Image (cartoon, rainbow, N blue to C red):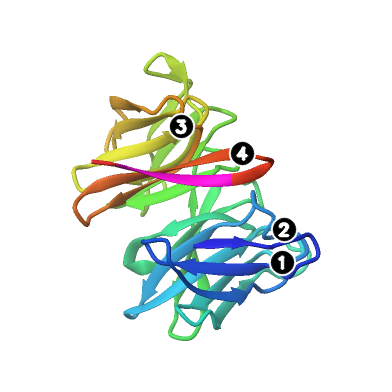
Amino acid sequence: MLCGKTSEDATPVIHHYSHQGELINTWPALPCPKVHEGENNFLLEIFIDNKQYLATQCHHDECKEIILYSLPSGDVTSVYRGKPGEKAVKPWAMCIGPDNSVLAIDMGGDGKSVVEFTWNGTKLVLTKSIPTEIDQAFSVHYSEGRVFTCQWPEEVICAVDYTSGETLWKVQGKVHGKPCYPHGMCTDTQGRLYVADGENERVLVLQASTGRFIQEIDMKGVGTIVGVAWSETQPHLVVWVQNWEDEKEKIRYFRIT
């Protein structure tokens, strides 16, 4: 999936691609004065009641919203929007939570919480707030009762208990001899947490339950690693890298078995 616009004056659009890179559909995104400019837009594919949806977010004061599009049609199914002038909730990065809920970093308030949205049969509703120790985290991931957040300016990765909000572990500073700049996370079925360490061009592998370092996957020369995902189909890790060529942003994907 990609979200963008063809020029500064063009209407923002969402492009829906298959895993093979084939274009399935394109539709206009709901307008926002600041969203769809690259660094502030997140896409999340999710299944609710056996139906496929795409969630997008905008944390700016003008919107503070999460939009749910039906796939493959692109029809707007639900919009959660914060009230004008309120400090929270300002949803940032998202992930799939328990029972196909949507977890999002809340950039409002003190910036140290993850909020949960659930489907009530007709729309997304805000149901829970989970405290974290990381101020304005960059990425969030959920697995087996744990909520993982990370932030690269402070070089920190943290895990909290989904139910109690208790901090389970925190890794900060150097990991395996280098400062860590975490950009994205995922877990596999063996209890390992993969962390995209962007500027170091490596993927860190940690024990999800304790934060213990297991290994690093060296990817020198590929560019800034901005995300990782685990695939259960013929189990492998997918890594995506951000590059600039001819003043245009390029995203490349690598498969690691």
Q: What is the spatial separation of the Cα atoms under label 1 and label 3, in whole angstroms?
A: 36 Å
The correct choice, above or below, for 102 with respect to 220 in the image is: below
Q: How many residues crowd mark 2 within 10 Å: few (<14), some (14–19), many (20+)?
A: some
Check disc 4 and report its element: helix, strand or loop.
Answer: strand
At 72% from the left and 58% from the top, the residue drawn is 60
- Is 132 positioned to the left or the right of 194 in the image? right
Residue 63 numbered mark, or none: 1
- CB within 8 Å, label 2 to label 3: no
Q: What is the spatial separation of the Cα atoms under label 4 and label 2, in whole angstroms?
A: 26 Å
Magenta includes 202? no
Q: Would you name the residue on which mark 4 appears?
A: 244
Q: What is the spatial separation of the Cα atoms under label 1 and label 4, in whole angstroms?
A: 30 Å
- CB within 8 Å, label 1 to label 3: no
Q: Which amino acid type is marked by label 4?
A: Trp
- CB within 8 Å, label 1 to label 2: yes
Q: Which amino acid type is marked by label 3?
A: Val
Which stretch did the figure color magenta? 250-255
Q: Would you name the residue on which mark 2 appears?
A: 60
- CB within 8 Å, label 1 to label 4: no
Q: Would you name the residue on which mark 3 appears?
A: 222
